[in-house]
Image (cartoon, helix red, strand yellow):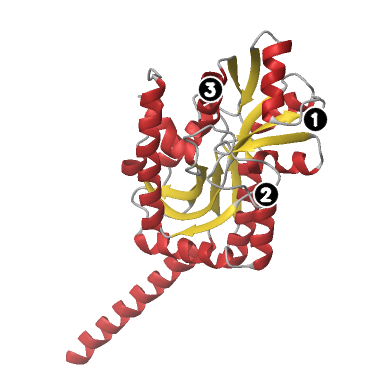
Amino acid sequence: MLMTFKVRVLKAFIFFFITLCSATSIAQTSPIKLMVGFPAGGGTDAIARLLGDQLSQTLGVPVIIENRAGAGGQIAAQALKNAPADGSVLFLSHDHTISILPLINKNAGFEPAKDFLPVAGVASFANGIALSASLNETTLDQFIQSIRTQHQGKASLGVPAPQSVPEFLVKVLARQYKLDLIAVPYKGSAPMIADMLGNQIPAGVASVPDFIEYQKARKLRMVAVMGSQRQTILPDTPTFTELGIKGFEDLPYYGIFAPKGTPPATIQRYNDALKKILEIPNVQQRLVALGLTIEYMSSQKLYERERAYSKNWARIIAESGLKLE
């Protein structure tokens, strides 16, 4: 009788072990969807595809990039909130969607601290202003002077999303130089840059990763960037601080997020993988070439960074007098 009981226990343990191994195997071989809140062809998309390829190699599973463009990343963020919390869906986002949108839109449809789990921070970057290469002006001061003397103090500048950091930067420039500057919002940087290249708008404000390939090809000319020091990849481009425009020293970030409820072990597994990926020399070179400063952050560090960034921008937005939607 005792032997029968032991056999039953042994069979139950073997069944449990096989089931556990099967579940683990499924989790390790199921595709991962990495969502991006902006169109293909932009800086965020390029970063996602690089990291997605490396994640696939590191984890041994397919990683599919899904562009959920629109509303400054809001559509993708809402999709992440409603995604299964099993590690099958991740979201690569920068500061605008995660930190800024909830501050300016009462009905954003998501609350980062409540609905998302930070997985890992991957980089910081700078926003900046770029001019069409067809313009004669080669510096921000020359561009401002041209607006004042040749265009009656009025000009339109493109921004990748409405009520974004680039749009606030346009507002600051208008106030600093006492000009009538209009921020023209686009659905991402790619269509904005297309209009800049086609001379539909003379200038735009977006991230260095969005502009850098066109800067290298001399199709656009970056004339000022955020940050407390110049970007390594743009040593000849001054910061706004150097030009006397204060308040844009704190750099935005890129991070990867998962739905709330994703198991801690899964979050840690992805974090460990991304940490290793960011240590690969070839990956470092490619990210720097995209205009990023590599900045690995643990899940907790990314959480702290996002909260501090959100607090800082809550103050800036309040000082701007912007009325919430």
The residue at 50%/46% (across/down) is 253
Residue 33 or residue 269, whichever sits in front:
269
Asked which quadrant contains residue 226, the reply is top right
First in sequence, mark 2 or 3: give its number: 3
The residue at 56%/27% (across/down) is 161
> Comparing marks 2 and 3, which lies closer to the viewer?
3
Question: Residue placed farthest to the top in the image?
Answer: 152
Cα–Cα gap, marks 1 and 2: 20 Å
Please state if 17 lies on the left or on the right of 194 as rendered.
left
Question: Residue placed farthest to the bottom in the image?
Answer: 3
Cα–Cα gap, marks 2 and 3: 30 Å
Residue 140 or residue 201, whichever sits in front:
140
Please give the residue where the numbered disc 1 appears in the rendered image: 133
Q: Name the image quarter holding the N terminus.
A: bottom left
What's the amino acid at mark 1?
Ala
Residue 50 horizontal/vertical position (percent): 65, 54
Residue 33 horizontal/vertical position (percent): 54, 49
Residue 17 or residue 96, whichever sits in front:
96
**Which labelled disc corresponds to residue 290?**
2
At label 1, counting other C-alpha atoms closer than 10 Å, the crowd grade (few under 14, some 14-19, many 20 or more) is many
**Which labelled disc corresponds to residue 176?**
3
Residue 152 horizontal/vertical position (percent): 67, 8
The residue at 61%/36% (across/down) is 128
First in sequence, mark 1 or 3: give its number: 1
Q: Name the image quarter holding the C terminus.
A: top left
What's the amino acid at mark 3?
Gln
At label 2, counting other C-alpha atoms closer than 10 Å, the crowd grade (few under 14, some 14-19, many 20 or more) is many
From where the camera sits, is residue 82 visible? no
Cα–Cα gap, marks 1 and 3: 24 Å
